[in-house]
Amino acid sequence: MTDYSTIDFTPLLEAAEDEVITRSYVRDVALPSGGVLALITLDNGHDHRRPNTLGPRTLAELESALESLGARAAAGEIAAVGITGKPFIFAAGADLSKVSTLADERNARLMAQFGHRVLGRLGRLGVPSFAFVNGLALGGAMEIALNCDYRTLDSSTAALAFPEVFLGLIPGWGGATIVPNLIGIESALEIIVSNPLKNNRMLKPQQAYDLGLFDALFGSASFLERSIRWADGVLNGAVDVKRPHVPGKTERLIKWPAAIKIARDTLTARIGTAAKAPYVALDLLAAAKDGNIEKGFAREDEALAELIAGDQFHASIYAFDLVQKRAKRPAGAPPKELARPVRKVGIIGAGLMASQFALLFARKLRVPVLITDLDQARVDKGIDYIRGEIDKMLDKGRLTSDDANQVKALVSGTTDKSAYADCDWVIEAVFEELGVKQQVFAEIEPIIREDAVIATNTSSLSVEEIGAKLAHPERLVGFHFFNPVAVMPLIEVVRVPSTSEETLATAMETAKKLGKSAVITADRPGFVVNRLLAKVMGEAARALDAGTPLPVVERAFAPIGLPMGPFELIDLVGWKVAAHVQDTMVAAFPERFYASENLHALAEIEEPLVKNKHGKVEDLSKAAKKALSFGRDAVSEEEILRRVEDELAGEIRIMLDPADPGGGVVAAAEDIDLCLILGAGWPFQAGGATPYLDRVGASERAFGSTFHNPPVAGVS
């Protein structure tokens, strides 16, 4: 057992000299039945745009407050201690900007130990402690609540989560130990391991309460007053707190190890073994079966120290900063004041992609959305799909009944293109063929207003060529979504020389209102994501054509940590789409992109792959093997990985060179990384593509230098 009271935390506090401190303000509250509850309010003095965070100096201030309250409890001055946050925000967890500066293992361990020492005091005050979680609570904030004896929750709380695994860490201030012993191993696995790996999925308040993380759930109206009355009821015996999800002996002996094994097998099948944090979290959750809190905290100390001092956490922070900061201030974006209002949207097409667009625009913008197609049957099919998806959202509680009815009413369909006349925004979602796209724009332009934006969702064709026959090319912009539209957070906004500032501003603001992150790219073949995925697919196809078994090719990419191997990705994207993208890139840059006849042959086979129960690719199907032709020069996993790394490094270097005909695609390497993280699932723990390529030496091999100079901290 670690004696935290004997540890000198001075080096940690000195390292956090410039921390924005979240203060612990204490006031006494008279309880209805008599006695006093000392209420701590966490507040960093900023408005809601800067949430409370928990750095070393914040913890030191909280510890000072708790030490004083412990003395008051011993003197009989207070009956209980409560802790809450400033309006709408409990706390956003550890201050990541401070955690990431703790480069050595000693300070990393001190950060874990200090959190345990301070938060542990909440359960040793001599009087009951209550967490009144009045708003956003992430990571360490959830652990403040867990270290209290009792917990209430505001039912309107915007976000609750343990996001640590997503960032290359583990819940290290008690979460990995307390949670499974409070709500059971299966629920703990879901919220600590599974949710972070599902694009950092949040818990809804009702869900958190139902799981057993909180003891009471109150509405936001008079939340604090009701929580204090409830706490008074607990103190005087009027409220009996039951915790039915606490695991018993049978669960610990039988269900616990079985759940850990299933989770480990599923994790390996889904993400491979490149990411460390999920497996460290699994080990901690497995060990928590002993129910020993002190031993569990010591295990968390060691695990957190190792992860904070390791490469993957620092890489994750680089990626996190891109998503949280750069994505919100896109390079090259004109002033948002130039954006025109979008009061009606027109979508050319009624197929699956067009229907997904229509649903997204209607849900997020809450404006009328019109879809059209060649015949009414196609239009009706699209409308039916949209309404079916809305019904699914209603059933899952993602839309209220009123919202569902409103969104349905906003979407309409017709074959009469004159209905586009009053649209402010028109986007095409038709077949990926230049002539087809030019034709639909030629038909629609005379109908719509001269200031209406015309957008194309092309994945690889030249936006400028698509709009070559427009009378007003200044209102043309590329607006490239990724599939599935509702889930993927990236939009590549493609600017051509004729695109006006007003059009670009409108596109950027529209993307923001759709809940997407937009990156501005130049009009180059494949833009960013598909151009680089074509490199990945091309090298996979090259190895397969040479005679390398497909399982070997899939395994070769595992060290990168991508969510799926190249052929699994192609299968998701669609074989014909992938072949088309590859053809486009080969046509544009024949000296640098690989053309594979086998890829086209696979596109004609109904079931080209054999998959396991997790959806992972195991091999080519018998039909595929029969239809393809292979060489006899199989290559090793190591050689395939080296090739793809070097090819990616070389291609990104060209993409960033404004003097190259294929370059000047984006403003900086960070934009490449952001696109791949948001549009291709490039893993956080790899820190974006360019730091990864620097770290493994591919940048030096490809062009004799690095993308980041000095290299990105922790990943060079």
Image (cartoon, rainbow, N blue to C red):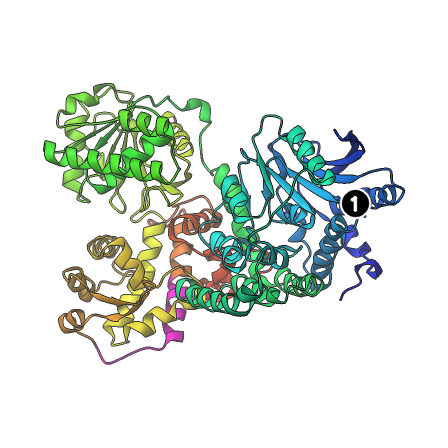
Q: Main secondary structure of the magenta part?
A: helix
**How far across and down, in percent of the image, does residue 201 sit?**
47, 47
Q: Against 464, is 176 above or below?
A: below
Does 634 appear in magenta? yes
* Horizontal side, residue 475 vs residue 438: left or right: right
Residue 370 visible, this orientation: yes
- The image shows residue 372 at horizontal and vertical percentages of 17, 30
Q: Which of the pair 380/494 is nearer the observer?
A: 380
Residue under label 1: 127
Q: Position of residue 229 (x, y in %)?
A: 68, 32
The disc labelled 1 sits on which kind of residue? Val
**Which segment did they paint magenta?**
631-647
Q: Quadrant of the N terminus?
A: bottom right
Q: Would residue 447 be seen by someone viewing this image from the given angle?
A: no
Camera-nearest residue between 705 and 305: 305
Query: Image quadrant of residue 618?
Result: bottom left
393 over 259 or under it: above or below = above
Q: Position of residue 11 (x, y in %)?
A: 79, 56
Q: Residue at x 20, y 63 (%)?
A: 599
Q: Is residue 375 above or below residue 652?
A: above
Q: Residues within 10 Å of mark 1 (few under 14, many from 20)?
A: many
